[in-house]
Amino acid sequence: MKAIVILTISFYFSLNAYAQPERRPARMTYTPRDYSKFEQLVREKDQKYTQNAEYIQNLKYWIHELENETTEELFLSEMQSSLNKLRTLEGGDLAESYLDIREVEMAVKVSIDDYNKRVEELPVKLWESGKSKQASGDLEGAIADYSSLISIDPDFLGTYLQRGYLYYLKGQYQEALSDLNIFIKNNSNVAFAYETRGWTKNILQDHIGAMSDFNQQILLQPTEKAYYNRGSVKSELGDNFGAIEDYTKAIEMNPNFSMAYNNRGWAKFKMKKPNESIVDLNMALEIDPKNAVAWDSRQEVKYSLGDYQGCIADCDKAIELISSMANSYFFRGKAKLKLGKKEEACKDFSKAGELGIIESYALIKANCN
């Protein structure tokens, strides 16, 4: 029995020879950590995000306002580029985008400075472009440039004078009058402005207004042309004696003034002085053989004197110089009719009618079957 007991005890100890003692989890102690710096960083990042988002929105609003200030394609293109960059930044880390946003803002400011510089230079460029086109005969292009200049700088007064003059040349008399009125209202010391407005008013049948403008032109610049202009209006008003005085003054100032001789000769013809008229008209043609108006004037005087061959010769010359000289076709037809050349006369009457002389149709009806 004793041996068994020993074995049993030995066996018990052998079973527990390598047994581990029971282990419990170590106790954890809670020591609060300092998260304040981390939270501060989070708050700062959130704040940067919000600030940068507002920054972008303010820039976008500003750019849209700028876009409404102009229609210039270059500036609008630059603004669209800046908007696209802002939209790209919105899709990234806004909290870290301040410098990039700032860069866009600076680019917009550069665009504004460049635009303002172009705006300052543009009036001069448009003025020079308009003058160049005007000199080359491109009246439409010049008017377009002057109109653009007026739209951006209404105080550039010379533009109204130039555009008004071009409107006059193009036969747009109301537009010409409007521009010239604006110019003269602000600058009353330019003779050319009164001259152009005077002729504009004369064409619009405001002969009294034209006379006033030509009087002012003479006060400012008493040239042969100014006296010629006033003489033309006096003739329109039936003051042939006054017209002759002004034409004579113009001739005294410029003895080679062909049209002054023509107009003085025509005024004398209207005063029933055909022989004195012929003298002036001969002088006009001696000075300028290509003066188609003088040939046309003299043919009518010759017709009144019964010189039908001479009338036809002068008509031929006037038509040779200006093929649309309606009055010369009309009187050539009348002279040919007097000489019994009915068929040729009828052709001239027909051409004169086509060119606007209504009286021709009565002669066709009476003489041309």
Image (tube, rainbow, N blue to C red):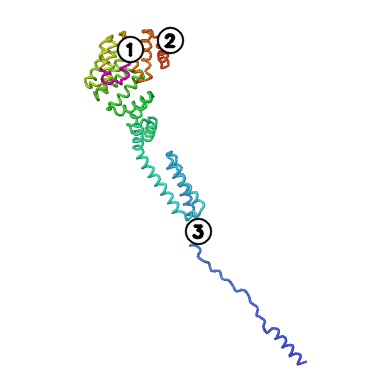
| Disc nearer the start of the sequence (3/1) | 3
Q: Which is nearer the eye, 1 or 125?
A: 125
Which of the 4 quarters of the picture holds residue 314?
Answer: top left
Kind of residue sitting beneath label 2: Ile
Residue 169 vertical position relative to residue 234 in the rendered view, above or below: below
Q: Nearer the viewer, mark 3 or mark 1?
A: 1
Q: Which is nearer the eye, 81 or 68?
A: 81
Residue stretch rendered in magenta on the structure: 283-297
* Residue that badge 1 annotates: 311
Residue 309 vertical position relative to residue 133 in the rendered view, above or below: above
Q: Secondary structure at mark 3?
A: helix
Name the outermost residue toward the right: 1
* Residue that badge 2 annotates: 364
Estimate how packed mark 2 is, as few (under 14), some (14 to 19) or many (20 or more) residues with alpha carbons within 10 Å. Answer: some
* Residue beneath the point at 35% across and 38% down: 125
Q: Position of residue 316 (x, y in %)?
A: 35, 16
* Residue beneath the point at 28% across and 9% down: 272
Estimate how packed mark 3 is, as few (under 14), some (14 to 19) or many (20 or more) residues with alpha carbons within 10 Å. Answer: few
Q: Which mark is residue 254?
A: none
Kind of residue sitting beneath label 1: Cys
Mark 3 and mark 1 residues within 8 Å of each other at the beta carbon: no
Could you tell me how far apart the alpha carbons at marks 2 and 3 are, in whole angstroms?
Answer: 104 Å
Could you tell me how far apart the alpha carbons at marks 2 and 1 are, in whole angstroms?
Answer: 20 Å
Q: Which mark is residue 42?
A: 3
Which quarter of the rendering shows the C terminus? top left
* Residue beneath the point at 59% across and 73% down: 27
